[in-house]
Image: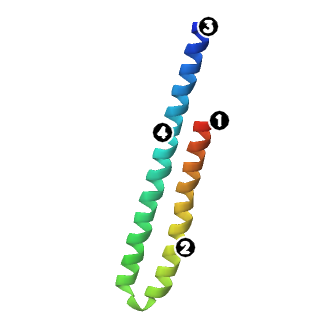
Amino acid sequence: MSAEANIVASNLDSIKLIAMAFTIAVGGMIPALSIGKVGAKAMESIGRNPESASKVMTAMLIAAAFIEAIAIYALVVALIIKFV
């Protein structure tokens, strides 16, 4: 391989690492903030109306599961960037 080909391959690897890091950083940070906000609002709602705790808790857990799925999708995208 020529020197130019090595430089291009090295640059491509660097770009892939940066893209992977950005994907997993944003894909982990946004769902974490969202789950925190959902949990805080659920606890506030239960504090205001304790009788609705079971309904609020069920809805909160379902919402947290969907939000966590977004983080898992980000992990999958980061792995695809790394290995492709």
Which quadrant does the N terminus fall into?
A: top right
Please determine whether, in this image, residue 65 is positioned above or below residue 47. above
The amino acid beneath tag 3 is: Ser
> Mark 2 — residue?
62
Disc 1 marks which residue?
A: 84
Circle 1 residues within 10 Å: few <14, some 14–19, many ≥20: few
Amino acid beneath label 2: Ile
Q: Which mark is residue 2?
A: 3
Relative height, residue 66 to residue 29 (above, below)? below
- Alpha-carbon neighbours of circle 2 within 10 Å: few (<14), some, or many (≥20)? few
* Disc 3 residue crowd, few under 14, some 14–19, many 20+, Cα 10 Å: few
Q: Amino acid at mark 4?
A: Ala
Q: CA distance from mark 2 to mark 1?
A: 33 Å
Which residue is depicted at the point 38% across and 70% down? 40
Identify the residue position indicated by label 4 in the image.
21
Q: How much space separates mark 3 and mark 2, taking CA atoms?
A: 55 Å
Disc on the earlier residue, 3 or 2 = 3
The mark lying in front, picked from 2 and 4, is 4
Q: Earlier in the sequence, mark 2 or mark 1?
A: 2
